Image (cartoon, rainbow, N blue to C red):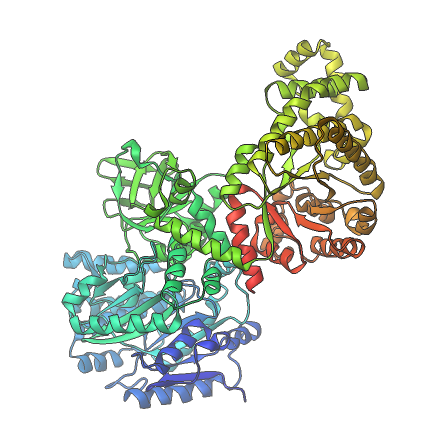
């Protein structure tokens, strides 16, 4: 029979860190730490596939109980204690551990094995009755909530009453007599809730806990987390059963969470927090305000020195920043977990760069360590601190960034209001894993309690979301949906601003300023004063050396072109000429052209537009000196340029010298039932060739002028919405005739390419014919190609596409992530057919998918030459293209 339970202890383990698919991340790392001599409490791991089997069949897999029992015997032999023994009891923790770390998303149960008899044995064994009864009440509460489904607030209200009766502030101060009374009340609560007494038999407790961990794979927060981070649904979670070590034994005991480097900044310093006389959940739940890890050196010098040695050893061994959980039991250190730590993107680029310099990882590995979608956060604005705004309160800066929004006080409200388009800040006394969907929806998280390693801090950092925690001046009243700071009250729906870099919280919606990276690019900050920028720049430099795909930008103005070039764009993949017609005199001339009664009238209006369009192209060519510029000819239907009534229509009629009735007749004659598939793109250029002539002349005259000034111009003229090779051939003839005429007039010949945007399925299927008609490049317009392939309107699909994604009908929104199985097959076919005619055919994409990492990986695999995206997504595309090449 295949082994399904794996033991670790006594300096050796059945497994290594390479066994994550089988043991989960936590189990594999516990095995690895055991093998390299780290002090880990002994235990065993039930493999991940058992979760899948249980969830499918609804019962424990056959023979598994016997394997677990055999491992319990090994645990008893290793510890010298017996599971369920009344005088020398063995207690265990039961914890989840998926292949990919999902911090806080699934269930944990501590102190399992306690009952009315073993609690006495634990009290006698430890010589500390209060510790024993505190552990028992913790176990009852955890088990009651996780396994038996009792509500947490019922337990908390009973505990709060004991604090009140004792006149103390923390649970650790509640005397033993009241802890004993609390145990009785907890058992009564469980009986009342379930109709059954609390299970006293430790093995029954154990299997209840194991099944609860398996079931937690499917609870909402875990499902939401997997969806957020694209984690596979199989093979489920492992279950780790580990000998309990106790941080709540008194002043020589405690528990903590630490990182081998600062997860917010990336600074190379040991960073973390701990609590004296506490168990692990107290730290991550933010129930008590922890001490900084540096204070441990004075309080427990021996364990602290050992911890410093362990953290250095683990970072060297795993070659990454580690997130550690540890317990000190009466002066003895134990490691309960290590994993690669969640970090901000600023920390990610600094840590990756520094580890290369330290010889821990290669440049290629550093590039892989930074996720492309994270880079966007480095370009986001931050709070403008120069205005002198006075903070309402200050907490711990748990995750950098800045955000303003309406205060909301529960996760469901955050999700609902965000779906309605509101910007919201989730305000909580403290967050729990059940708040995950609200954290996803909110722009930032603000809590009154908790430390830098609390749940809110860790989750927010992991998803690059701004967070301020432990804001002690805040009094949160979730019942009345408000919080107060002194005599200031912020009610639900009122605006607050959160600065995750400083920890400051402000009333109202504050303005922002450019981020560090942007300030360097704008020349406002010298690079040597910007450590994040330096690391960011080095990582992207290494990425550029790794990738094959070129990265262009979608830019319609010289400003956008210059900005994109600062971000590393290697050309323009889409310049939309229609955007140039919507300003000042241009829109008037454009409307004059549309309303003209004949070709002569249209040409007179186009003559007015020509110098304007030429000047635009000169500015763009100048900004992109030496780089290719793909210019799409006029694409939208003409009615989009006209007013549809009101004062603007009256003024236009007066300007053009026509009656309101005549103008209305023109507007109505251009109205279309389905304009996306109507009279637009090359169809306009064929119906009104003078439009194509004007645009081609503007392009080539601008190119000639720039060439004479010493600017290297590489224009690529793109014909939109081609369905047949006849359409392309028609437009190509006009473009080449105008190019020849301009060359003769100016004495300057500018090399150029003519190609088409593939945005209709028929164009993809007849790609070979279009190349034979003279197309020198294809640019896949994946926005429209997705619409026409799936029969979806991008503007209307938002009403039901999220529903499709939630129910697995679509794996993702096809307008965000390329539909590889449908649209992707058309792209693959078109590339193959086109290059079958002309192997040097240049191919790229210019839809929104050009900045999306999964779509970029597909483009790399299909041999495309470039992707093109908006300026701010150029760094993302550069890094994603490198990831695709390194894979």
For the C terminus, the quadrant is bottom right
| Residue 739 visible (yes or no) | yes
Measuring from the top left, give residue 234's x and y in whole percent: 55, 69
* 766 is higher (above) or lower (below) than 45: above
In front here: 500 or 487? 500
In front here: 636 or 215? 636
For the N terminus, the quadrant is bottom right
Left or right: where 401 falls relative to 327: right
Query: Going 54% across and 72% down the picture, which residue do you hit?
Result: 235
The image quarter containing residue 783 is top right
In front here: 808 or 752? 752
* 194 is higher (above) or lower (below) than 616: below
The image quarter containing residue 36 is bottom left
Measuring from the top left, give residue 766's x and y in whole percent: 82, 50
Query: Going 28% across and 73% down the picture, which residue do you hit?
Result: 310
* 795 is higher (above) or lower (below) than 376: above
* 546 is higher (above) or lower (below) than 666: below
């Amino acid at each position: 029979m295949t082994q399904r339970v794996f033991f670790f202890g006594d300096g050796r383990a059945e497994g290594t860190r390479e066994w994550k698919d089988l043991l989960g991340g936590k189990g594999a790392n516990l095995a690895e730490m055991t093998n390299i001599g780290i002090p880990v409490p002994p235990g065993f791991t039930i493999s991940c596939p058992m979760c899948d089997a249980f969830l499918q069949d609804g019962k424990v897999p056959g023979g598994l109980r016997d394997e677990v029992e055999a491992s319990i015997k090994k645990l008893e032999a290793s510890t010298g204690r017996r599971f369920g023994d009344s005088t020398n009891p063995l207690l265990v923790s039961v914890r989840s551990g998926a292949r990919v770390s999902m911090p806080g998303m699934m269930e944990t149960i501590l102190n399992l094995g306690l009952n009315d008899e073993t609690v006495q044995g634990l009290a006698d064994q430890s010589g500390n009755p209060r510790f024993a009864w505190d552990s028992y009440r913790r176990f009852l509460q955890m088990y009651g909530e996780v396994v038996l489904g009792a509500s947490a607030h019922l337990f908390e209200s009973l505990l709060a009453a004991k604090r009140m009766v004792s006149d103390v502030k923390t649970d650790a101060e509640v005397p033993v007599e009241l802890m004993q009374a609390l145990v009785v009340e907890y058992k009564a609560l469980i009986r009342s809730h379930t109709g059954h007494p609390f299970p006293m038999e430790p093995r029954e407790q154990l299997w209840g806990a194991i099944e609860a961990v398996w079931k937690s794979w499917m609870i909402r927060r875990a499902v939401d987390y997997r969806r957020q981070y694209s984690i596979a649904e199989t093979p489920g979670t492992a279950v780790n059963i580990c000998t309990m070590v106790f941080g709540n034994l008194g002043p020589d005991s405690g528990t903590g969470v630490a990182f081998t480097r600062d997860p917010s900044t990336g600074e190379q310093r040991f960073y973390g927090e701990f609590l004296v006389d506490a168990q692990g959940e107290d730290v991550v739940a933010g129930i008590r305000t922890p001490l900084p890890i540096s204070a441990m050196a004075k309080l427990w010098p021996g364990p602290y020195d050992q911890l410093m040695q362990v953290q250095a050893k683990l970072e060297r061994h795993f070659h990454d920043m580690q997130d550690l959980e540890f317990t000190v039991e009466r002066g003895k250190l134990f490691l309960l977990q290590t994993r690669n730590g969640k970090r901000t993107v600023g920390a990610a680029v600094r840590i990756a760069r520094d580890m290369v310099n330290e010889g821990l990882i290669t440049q290629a590995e550093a590039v892989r360590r930074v996720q492309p979608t994270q880079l966007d956060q480095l370009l986001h604005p931050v709070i403008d601190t120069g205005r002198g705004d006075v903070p309402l309160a200050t907490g711990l800066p748990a995750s950098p960034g800045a955000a303003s929004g309406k205060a909301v006080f529960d996760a469901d409200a955050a999700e609902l209001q965000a779906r309605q388009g509101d910007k919201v800040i989730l305000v909580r006394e403290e967050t729990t894993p059940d708040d995950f969907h609200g954290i996803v929806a909110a722009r930032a998280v603000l809590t009154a309690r908790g430390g830098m390693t609390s749940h809110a801090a860790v989750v927010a950092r992991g998803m690059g979301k701004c967070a301020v925690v432990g804001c002690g001046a805040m009094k949160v009243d979730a019942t009345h949906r408000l919080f107060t700071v002194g005599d200031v009250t912020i009610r639900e729906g009122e605006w607050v601003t959160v600065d995750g870099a400083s920890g400051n919280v402000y009333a109202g919606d504050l303005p922002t300023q450019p981020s560090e990276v942007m300030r360097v690019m704008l020349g406002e900050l010298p690079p040597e004063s910007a450590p994040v920028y330096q690391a960011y720049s080095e990582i992207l430099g290494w990425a550029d050396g790794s990738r094959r795909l070129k990265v262009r930008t979608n830019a319609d103005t010289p400003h956008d072109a210059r900005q994109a070039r600062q971000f590393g764009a290697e050309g323009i993949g889409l310049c939309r000429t229609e955007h140039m017609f919507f300003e000042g005199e241009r829109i008037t001339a454009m409307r004059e052209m549309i309303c003209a009664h004949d070709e002569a009238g249209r040409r007179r209006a186009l003559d007015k537009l020509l110098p304007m369009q030429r000047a635009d192209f000169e500015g763009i060519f100048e900004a992109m000196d030496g780089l290719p510029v793909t210019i799409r000819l006029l694409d939208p239907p003409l009615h989009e340029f006209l007013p549809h009534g009101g004062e603007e229509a009256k003024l236009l009629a007066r300007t053009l010298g026509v009656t309101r009735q005549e103008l209305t007749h023109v507007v109505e004659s251009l109205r279309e039932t389905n304009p996306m598939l109507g009279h637009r793109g090359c169809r306009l250029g064929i119906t009104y060739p003078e439009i194509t002539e004007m645009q081609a002349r503007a392009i080539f005259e601008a190119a000639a002028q720039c060439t004479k000034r010493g600017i290297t111009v590489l224009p690529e003229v793109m014909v939109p919405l081609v369905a047949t090779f006849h359409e392309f051939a028609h437009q190509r003839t006009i473009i080449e005739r105008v190019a020849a005429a301009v060359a003769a007039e100016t004495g300057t010949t500018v090399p150029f390419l003519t190609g088409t945007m593939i945005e209709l399925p028929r164009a993809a299927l007849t790609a070979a014919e279009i190349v034979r008609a003279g197309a020198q490049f294809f640019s896949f317009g994946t926005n429209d190609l997705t619409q026409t392939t799936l029969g979806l309107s991008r503007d209307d699909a938002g009403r039901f596409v999220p529903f499709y994604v939630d129910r697995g009908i679509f794996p993702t929104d096809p307008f965000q992530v390329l539909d590889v199985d449908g649209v992707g097959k058309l792209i693959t076919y078109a590339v193959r057919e086109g290059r079958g005619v002309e192997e040097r055919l240049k191919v790229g994409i210019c839809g929104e998918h050009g900045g999306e990492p999964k779509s970029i990986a597909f483009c790399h695999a299909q041999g495309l030459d470039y992707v093109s995206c908006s300026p701010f997504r150029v760094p993302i595309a550069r890094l994603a293209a490198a990831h695709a090449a390194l894979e």
